[in-house]
Image (tube, rainbow, N blue to C red):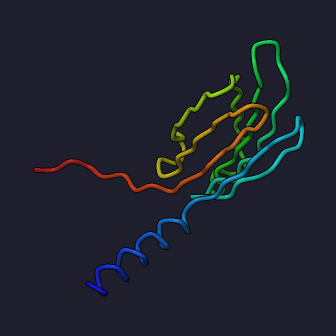
């Protein structure tokens, strides 16, 4: 029983080491995430239809080519997605009130087999 509990704690601790999270509570106050070989800078501004969130990211081994994501989040919105250039990078953007949270997570891809 003790071994099972210790193994579960070790597994949870290992999973937590692969996540990075930022919280943005003011317009134009940016922050950065660094996970799964991707560097991402994020900020938000006020827009007519919600908060416009801008994320600029670069895959570290892709010759410094950067990409930009722009999305409008309304109160209570949450969106999750992966990146085509780095399949193991998974991001969740969420908004509650005037606070935008972004979580980066490394995931493994499993291929179905017979």
Residue 50, position in %: x, y? 75, 19
Residue 22, position in %: x, y? 72, 51
Res 26 → quadrant: top right
Q: Which residue does the image show at 69% across and 34% down from the upper left?
A: 96
Quarter of the image with the N terminus in it: bottom left
Q: Is residue 64 left or right of residue 77?
A: right
Residue 60, position in %: x, y? 66, 56
Image: 13 above or below 21: below
Image: 42 above or below 98: below
Q: Is residue 53 left or right of residue 20?
A: right
Q: Residue furthest top?
A: 48
Q: Which residue does the image show at 77% across and 42% down from the upper left?
A: 42
Number of numbered callouts drawn: 0
Q: Which residue does the image show at 77% across and 25% down from the upper left?
A: 52
Q: Which residue does the image show at 51% across and 41% down from the upper left?
A: 82
Q: Is residue 43 left or right of residue 10?
A: right
Res 57 → quadrant: top right
Q: Residue furthest left?
A: 114
Q: Residue furthest bottom?
A: 2
In this view, the residue in front, 98 or 113, is 98
Res 72 → quadrant: top right
């Amino acid at each position: 029983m003790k071994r099972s509990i210790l193994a579960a704690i070790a597994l949870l601790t290992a999973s937590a080491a692969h996540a990075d999270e930022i919280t943005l509570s003011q317009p134009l106050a940016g922050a950065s995430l660094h996970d799964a070989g991707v560097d991402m800078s994020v900020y938000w501004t006020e827009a007519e239809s919600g908060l416009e969130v801008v994320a600029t990211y670069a895959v570290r081994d892709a010759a410094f080519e950067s990409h930009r994501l722009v999305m409008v989040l309304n109160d209570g919105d949450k969106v999750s997605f992966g990146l085509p250039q780095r399949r193991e990078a998974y991001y969740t953007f969420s908004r509650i009130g005037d606070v935008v949270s972004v979580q980066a997570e490394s995931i493994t891809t499993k291929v179905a087999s017979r």
